[in-house]
Amino acid sequence: MLIYKLFDANFHYILIGFFLEFWINYPNFLPHPVVFMGKAVNFCEKVFYVKDKNPNKLKRNGILVVLILVSVTYALFALIDKFLSESLMKWIMKIFFAYTIVATGSLLTECSKVLYLVQSDNMEKAREQLSMLVTRDTKMMEKEEIIRTTIETLSENLCDGVVAPLFYMFVGGIPLGMAYKMVSTLDSMLGYKNERYLYFGWATAKLDDIFAWLPARLTAFFIFIASFIMGFDWQKSVVIWRRDRNKTDSPNSGHPESAFAGAVGVWFGGKVRYFGKVYEKPIIGVKSEHIKEEHLQKSLNLAMGSSFVAVISMSIIEGVCRLW
């Protein structure tokens, strides 16, 4: 009976999918589920975006888009899970979907490309590579700002691309993991506070904040543990997290960012450019510290370690809960 309870758990296929994605990035020749999600978001935007820019209509239609896409995504994968018989094919499908939901390997790979280009003193290519990871303008960034921005996006995406997807897969299997992936895709495409999306993307941004609330705080906790295990400054990580976690406009991003900044010894914020406009972001970490290539390498190691701590911790917790 106890063996059956463990066999029925989620962590088997999640662990396999996690480590497959870590070692083998998703192949370019295969269409990724997120690509289809993006196309669905684009289609719904064309259908529901109100050209008269009435704030109430835009909010209402934005809510409709979120409800339709998230509920359909969950229902679709719940049906797939229900109608696939308990067989080897069902296990393969679950492993494949878990492989597409988590993004540890791809995140580390893309950020490593920036590090390689910086080390090669190819700043132009480094800016181009970074522009594929962030929404802010990168064309005028100097070396230190490129490194700092890469570390910042690495720390934030540790939650959005690794811990949060893992958390929702452990809680609700592939259907809930894919539903979160749709929420994250919606936020990345519509969740901007600019003229076009301020109202239309309001529901998207709020839902993403809700979904990421607990994972963001768990991410900080996993960073503390990984820092302790790997010999990073875990005590400073806790101190900076306690001091700076609520400085960001987002209720969530400050948690992994501040924990990461303290552990690695870097700082985030200051003047940044979005869509040609300069904004002043609050300082997270100790600004007097200079940021070098070594900090980015340390950050990649810490992100990897934190990801391992996250997936192993959640697997143990689920196994214990199944046996309880």
Image: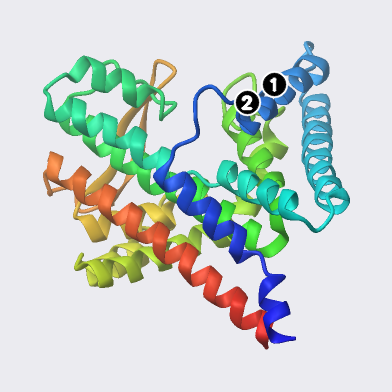
Given residues 138 and 126, the one toward you in this image is 126
Q: Which residue is mark 1?
A: 39
Q: Is residue 60 left or right of residue 237?
A: right
Amino acid on which the number 1 mark rests in the picture:
Lys
Q: Which mark is residue 72?
A: none
Res 142 → quadrant: top left
Q: Which residue is mark 2?
A: 35
Rounded to the nearest angstrom, the CA distance separating label 2 from label 1 is 6 Å
Amino acid on which the number 2 mark rests in the picture:
Val
Residue 263: image location, x then y, percent: 25, 60
Q: Residues within 10 Å of mark 1 (few under 14, many from 20)?
A: few
- Image point 25% across, 59% down: which residue? 262
Vertical side of 173 occupied by 294: above or below: above
Q: Is residue 97 left or right of residue 237?
A: right
Residue 311: image location, x then y, percent: 49, 63
Mark 2 element type: helix
Vertical side of 196 occupied by 102: above or below: below
- Image point 47% across, 68% down: which residue? 312
Q: Are marks 2 and 1 in contact (CB under 8 Å)?
A: yes
